[in-house]
Amino acid sequence: MTELVWVGTAYIGGLIASRLSFPPLVGYLVAGYILHSFGIELGQTLARLADIGIELLLFTVGLKLKLRSLLRREVLSVGGLHLLFVTGIASIVFLWLGEQTLGGLILGASLAFSSTVLAIKVLEDNGELSSLHGRGVLSILILQDIIAIALLAFADGRQLSPWAFALLILPVLRPLAHRLLTVSRADELRLLLGVSLALAGGVSSEIVDISADIGALLMGVMLADHPQTDDLANKLWGLKEVFLVAFFLQIGLADLPDRAQIINALGLLGILPLQGVLFFVLFLLAGLRSRTAFISSLALMTYSEFALITTGAVVKANLLSSEWNATIAVAVAGSLAIAAPLNRYSHQLFSRFEPFLTRFEKKTGHPDRLPESIGMAEWLVVGMGRTGVSAYNALHQQEKRVVGLDADPTVLESLLAEGRRVIYGDAEDPELWAGLPLDRVKCIILTLPDFEARCSAVRQLRKREYAGQIGTICYFPEEKQKLGQLGANFMIHPLVEAGNQLARQLGRDNSRLRE
């Protein structure tokens, strides 16, 4: 019965939050406070489920950990400098408040972390996870997560056991783990393998007297370069989110914030825009354009779920008073509630402030720069996924002068290595269409997966009075209608067209057989 109350209340809270355009986890935290007010206590079952959620979270972070992505200039400079600056300021504030300096230092560092859950969700919903700024944000989040793990280990206060070095045998087990993932072809088997490895990492770490979180992370790192890690991470995503609900519930169940704690939380929320400004300035200094810096800064302008975890560890180690648990919980929930709608309209917000923000750009040779020419191209394919590449190849076989455009640096690198003519560009960027020379271009083909991105591109092209043809894809009748109203000339449903092509091809083959 208790479990049903937990799950049902969390669902209702998450549903109400999502309907109000807030992240569901804001609703989970509120649900915890409501349950606490009704006298429902935190049980061992919920605490263990919360621990599993954290272990799965860190395991998936390990799966995405690639050293090359962390060594990029903007990742180290922006992520590192932001962390040092915020940690220093927070430490001074905690010292001024009379709190323990060491606890304040750890908590200050944790306040520099951004919400991994919200940022990835926003980028994924906008179809920007693989874009240049999406990869930059993800790399900074992973860097922050690694530092958070180190802080957790430090705050935990455990003496390093000689048996801890037994974890060094994990690389030896790497071929076995890779083999297990390769032979686990069924979806449920891969899911079970991922959960098993995450829990095994936690148990093995606890045996040698190390935090279970670190063991789960190391297990993920062990699989990081396997070709199926993305698939495994995607399968674990939903399960991890379910278990993390228990973590957010237990925060609210632990204690209700009093007036002083709410005031402190509001103070933390008041300085959150300064963190966004700091991110923006650092991104500009790293050579990114103002648009990329602005969208990335909004995605990172939150307090992280890890702040809740590190605060709990600091309080448990008696480095700070227990009142900070409730304060940080309210601050994290409030930051997510503020950031969610801002990120939803990040492109529109930048368009409004673009004349002011572009003044601060540095003129550098960073890959984020806009293309200045497309040569003698007469056809432009925007979005070089499977559909875009197929369109490019068909035009190339007809000896058309065609150029591809995409916002994913890894896609461009691969296509350039294959000898295709491709350039970098974000289709939702008005500055791209305003400056791109299209006088020779007869037709532009839009194969972007995101509907809003296609609408934005058509709108911008017609706004600059592009007179050529615009062809694009659509998946629903209402999409076709809106794209047509915006100015697209030709629209097809990829799956419908595949069926038509299959029928035509089989029909021709049967006719030949009869002849």
Image: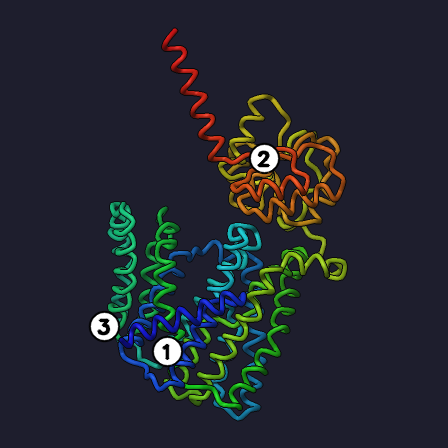
From the image, tell me which residue sits under label 2.
491
Upstream in the sequence, badge 2 or badge 3? 3
Whether 321 is drawn above or below 448: the answer is below
Figure quadrant of the C terminus:
top left
Front one among 249 and 192:
249
Tell me: 360 left or right of 315. right
The CA distance from mark 1 to mark 2 is 50 Å
Instruction: Please state the horizontal and vertical placement of residue 322, each as a whole percent of the image.
Output: 42, 88
Local secondary structure at mark 2: strand
Residue 250: image tag: 1
**Which of label 1 and label 3 is nearer to you?**
1
Q: Residues within 10 Å of mark 2 (few under 14, many from 20)?
A: some
Q: Residues within 10 Å of mark 1 (few under 14, many from 20)?
A: many
The amino acid type, in three-letter code, at marker 1 is Gln
**Which of label 2 and label 3 is nearer to you?**
2
Residue 339 found in image quarter:
bottom right
Instruction: Please state the horizontal and vertical placement of residue 168, each as a whole percent of the image.
Output: 29, 63
Tell me: 401 left or right of 7. right
From the image, tell me which residue sits under label 3.
207
Disc 2 + disc 3, Cβ < 8 Å: no
Instruction: Please state the horizontal and vertical placement of residue 74, each as a whole percent of the image.
Output: 58, 59
